[in-house]
Amino acid sequence: MPPTRFRTLVIVAGAALITLFVLSSSTRQVASHAASAVKPANFPTFDLEVPTRFTWHHSAHKPPEQKNSTSGEASWYADWRWLNPFSSSVTLDEDRALLPPLAERPFVYTYCDTTVKRDEETKKVDSEIIQTWRRAWWAKGFRPVVLTQAEAMANPLYRELGPKGMQKTLEYDFARWLAWSHMGTGLLADIFCVPMATYDDPLLSHLRRNDFEQLTRFEGLGNGLFAGNKAQVESAVKNALNDARLSTFKSITEAVQSSQFRVEQPTSFAYYDSESLTRRYSAVADEILLDPIKGRRELNKLIVSHLHTVWQNTFSTGIEVLKPLPAHTTALVEPSLHLAQLLVECPETLLPSSCPPNKPKCTPCVGSRMPITQPEAFRNVSTLYTIATVPHPYTMITLNNQSSEITIAHIRRKTPRDSWIHSVTRDVLGDGRGGPSRVVAFKDAVASTFGQQRSLWFTVEHFPSNIAIDITSDKVPTNDVQSAPIDTRTPFPENWLQEMAWHFGFAIPRSTISHGESMSPVPLPGDQRWQKGQQGIPADKKGSYDPPDPTENQQRVEAQLLKKARDTINSKDKRLRQMRDVAEKWNLADLEAWRFVRAFHARKVVERELFEEEESRFDGTGGARGGRWW
């Protein structure tokens, strides 16, 4: 007979099984009965097809190559996901950078009368003025286009100008408008009307949207600037040509009915018409009367100087040339520093202390000097302009170690990861972030709309490899601005400075003049401004966080290492490529920053070169010309 304990266990197990079956059956019946008693809710039905793959899954194939998306070793793909920490997660290509889509540039037109015969010197001056006009508008996000009689004659209404018997000035105005009407929506500006404001100025931002509810003119600018779409311009021209009083009008603003115009205040534009020159800049106006060619060249210099002055006033706090990891990066940032020194100089002009017509209370360049500092980290300040050089990871490793004899073991054991981008973003993100989040902040500083207008980033390879910095001067500080000797600077090739002029919107000064500093004729004891290596030049003030100046030997070593690193990066040698690859994989965030800046800068150059190639035939100084592609 089984033990008592075993019998008890069997009885309990049996009771549990019986209870389980009984209760489960009853529960199912009750639940089923309750469910049948509940009236089902009426929900709308949708005929939706659920995709088998979701949109956030990574693509299995590389995105197609876009038009004009390569330049040398740089390649890029424009996409709204450009703030992704690593481009390869979208492009599926290690060497292809992810960039923001290019902003559309609305058209701004000007009209040049090519029927008037010009000598070669006049053509040259006109070409210089057109180039100044183009750069000024290009830097503010527009696409400047020069129109001539060819566009006016392409308009069917052009044949009606002759029989109307209008005055010559009015006929010229109608030719401008007919050319504008033929081209379409956009702005029509006089060749001496340029934007003189910041990129994010409200009026400029509105005009860049290229959406005009009504034909617009600007108070006080006369024929200097108009805005409108194609239909509005055509309607205004037709109504004006049908006006019985047409022969009595002197300008297009009189011929077009005032009800068709919307009037805006032109606070963002400077117009150098004859009235403005006579009233504000009489010295230039007198020069034009005495010698038209020389006078027009002086007017062009005046416009350039005002564009430069407005830029300097925008960044009143000064220019910061970033110098992260400053112990051994003097040679690395030297080209950026010399560019900054050229930007703080005053352009040559007949009226160095004058202000633009729309900003009479500006601070002239000769009355002050923008400070230049060299901090280690980027600061997001709207009144600061930042210039920075981004090194390749291998370049940074050789500079930090002061040797080109680097081994793979040394990189892995002795080299911190992503040291450059950590140093650059320390003020913005602190010390607790990793590389990916720092790359996102870095890309925003480089390529956002705000960042593009307040910073300029290069890679070492963007600078010419044979730069010869030669800043020599026998200038002695003087209280007489007119007698101050000129200090010639030639650190960059001419074509490189021309490229920078398109970015800034004005020609970069090639020489320096006095900033109007009042100095004692005899240096006083302790006057630090006189203590500088080159005789006669006042010493620059040193910021609290500026690094100490390196010795000549240190500069020589850094320059040699930079040259070797550049050769290594471009080398096809298997051993050198292996070393470069290890440096890149050890510093993925630094590498992403370098590739991003390389591609971003290259795309800007490609965009501008394509525009110049298209517009090179239409400089407004020639005679016969072909048709445009549009």
Image (cartoon, rainbow, N blue to C red):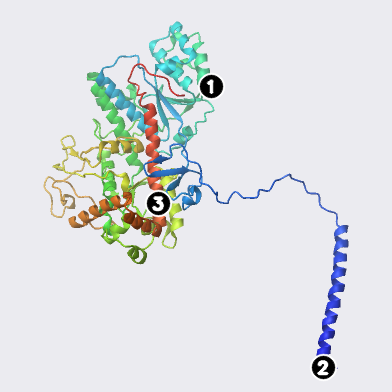
Please tell me which residue lies in front, 87 or 161. 87
Q: Where is residue 509, by image quadrant?
A: top left
Residue position marked by numbered label 2 in the rendering: 3
Residue 64's label in the rendered image is none
Q: Nearer the viewer, residue 542 or 211?
A: 211
Q: Are marks 2 and 3 in contact (CB under 8 Å)?
A: no
Mark 3 Cα within 10 Å, few/some/many (few <14, many 20+)? many
Q: Nearer the viewer, residue 33 or 509?
A: 33
Check whether the beta carbons of the residues at disc 1 and disc 2 lie within 8 A of each other: no
Q: Could you tell me residue 137's position as x and y percent?
A: 39, 32
Q: Which residue is mark 3?
A: 593
Q: Amino acid at mark 2?
A: Pro
Q: Earlier in the sequence, mark 3 or mark 1?
A: 1
Q: Is residue 189 above or below residue 384?
A: above
Q: Is residue 167 visible?
A: yes
Q: Position of residue 472 (x, y in %)?
A: 16, 43
* Residue beneath the point at 25% across and 27% down: 298
> Residue 254, image x and y in percent?
45, 16
Q: Quadrant of the N terminus?
A: bottom right
Give the SS element for disc 2.
loop
Amino acid on which disc 1 is placed:
Ala
Measured as percent of width and height from the top left, residue 8 is found at 83, 88
Give me the C-alpha separation between circle 3 and circle 1.
46 Å
In the image: residue 208, left or right of residue 330: right
Q: Which mark is residue 231?
A: 1
Q: Earlier in the sequence, mark 1 or mark 2?
A: 2
In this view, 291 is above or below 436: above
Q: Residue at x 28, y 21 (%)?
A: 123
Which label sits in the foreground, 1 or 2?
2
In the figure, residue 280 lies in which quadrant?
Answer: top left
Q: Earlier in the sequence, mark 2 or mark 3?
A: 2
